[in-house]
Amino acid sequence: MDNLVRIALLPGDGVGPEVMAEVLPCLDWLQSRGRRLEIYHLPFGADNFLETGETLPEEAFEELRDGFDAILFGAVGDPRIPDGRHAEEILLRLRQGLELTVNYRPCRPLASGSRPALDIEVFRENTEGPYCLQGSTEPGRAVDLAIHTEPAVRRLLQAAFQRAGSRGCPLTLAHKANVLKHGHGLWMRTFEELREQNPGVAAHGMHADALLCALVQDPTPFGVIAADNYLGDLISDLCAGFVGGMGVAPSISWAPHRPYRCAVLAEPVHGSAPDLAGKGLANPVGMLLSTALLFRHLGSEGEAAALEGAVSIALAEGAKSRDLGGTLSTAAMGRAIRDHLPR
Ligand code: NAD
Ligand code: IPM
Ligand code: MN
């Protein structure tokens, strides 16, 4: 019998709660198939911050870190908090505090048949680079530090090499080592070392600017793309654009070295979409595919594939929210997808 899995749900802001609502029946469905879950809803986000002054209290962070196995996250960001302080103190705190080094962002056409022509998986380092949030604003001068450490770079690259090796696909490292001699110099050295240890993987580095042009011209030759936090953020949104846009792109982050009980967080690539919030217009596909990635990570491979399959079938049958050119609401999209889950 499976162990009990404790999952924390943090819907967050804007469309976050709307897309998270479509996840709940999928968690019930997973339980109906024998997986034992304990699910907790946590309120952290803009409303809670504006009401209580708290973003993610230290006790809550510690409870998440030590008392849960996984987090499902919606999105954070609210126009009433223009400096995004709560987003940093919630989302970046979780990514960094739980050492969720590997952020995996797959991009495949959704309603395609057997083997998609485009099959890119972005491995984004998720805790460092300019996201270390160290810097200063002075008169006439502003500084953002970017810190890269060898253990995190190595963990990210090892995961990317492993995946490219098991897929038998090329691995491309996106970098700007021609300018960022220190930080990306470390990336290049570590990449070279792992390349020598993994002779079976066709791995090479590309300047990120040239990579973006090559991707736009023809994304199909690419397989796994590894990048630091900042470049990975940009590349993954570009790739989302190849397969339907922000509403459909999933992601999952994990800590390969498992420093804490809670070593995984799944969240869509998109943000809180304030332009859509409260209107029932958000596409829940990115959130639901992130949920499928979590099912897979937890060992429920059959259910992960079934949920991904349900999304593909619903889209192939014409279920479309507004971002995909259709008229279905968030809830109607969720229902159209769930209709294709095996009982
Ligand atoms: P965004 O992803 O929220 O929106 C970008 C575009 O994609 C908008 O046109 C939006 O309507 C569309 N979009 C996003 N999600 C969609 C969905 N589910 N269905 C259909 N269309 C969708 O990015 P942004 O506008 O740059 O940022 C808005 C806020 O979200 C900001 O506060 C930003 O900091 C935050 N943000 C948070 C996360 C996160 O929580 N992981 C990610 C990105 C942005
Ligand atoms: C993402 C977002 C975040 C990031 C923001 C909201 C901090 O764009 O998850 O891709 O830059 O990582
Ligand atoms: Mn982003």
Image (cartoon, rainbow, N blue to C red):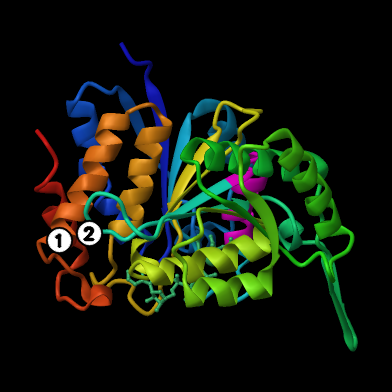
Local crowd at mark 1 within 10 Å, few (<14), some, or many (≥20)?
Answer: some
Q: Which of the image's four quarters has the C terminus?
A: top left
Give the residue number, with chain letter if any, for mark 1: 316
Residue 43 position in % (x across, y down):
43, 50
Q: CA distance from mark 2 to mark 1?
A: 5 Å
Residue name at image x 68 percent, y 54 percent: 204
Q: Quadrant of ligand 3?
A: bottom right
Residue 303 vs residue 108: left or right? left
CB at disc 1 and ligand 1 closer than 8 Å? no
Do tag 2 and tag 1 residues touch (Cβ < 8 Å)? yes
Query: Which residues make up the magenta segment?
Result: 87-102
Q: Is residue 176 above or below residue 52?
A: below
Residue name at image x 89 percent, y 89 percent: 140
Q: Is residue 309 above or below residue 342?
A: below
Amino acid type shown at disc 1: Ala
Q: Is residue 207 above or below residue 74?
A: below
Instruction: State which quadrant residue 334 falls in.
Output: bottom left
Amino acid type shown at disc 2: Ala
Residue 60 vs residue 332: left or right? right
Identify which residue, 198 or 14, lies in the foreground.
198
Residue 84 position in % (x across, y down):
60, 69
Give the residue number, with chain letter if any, for mark 2: 111
Considering the numbered disc 1 on the image, is that residue within a helix, a strand or a loop?
Answer: helix
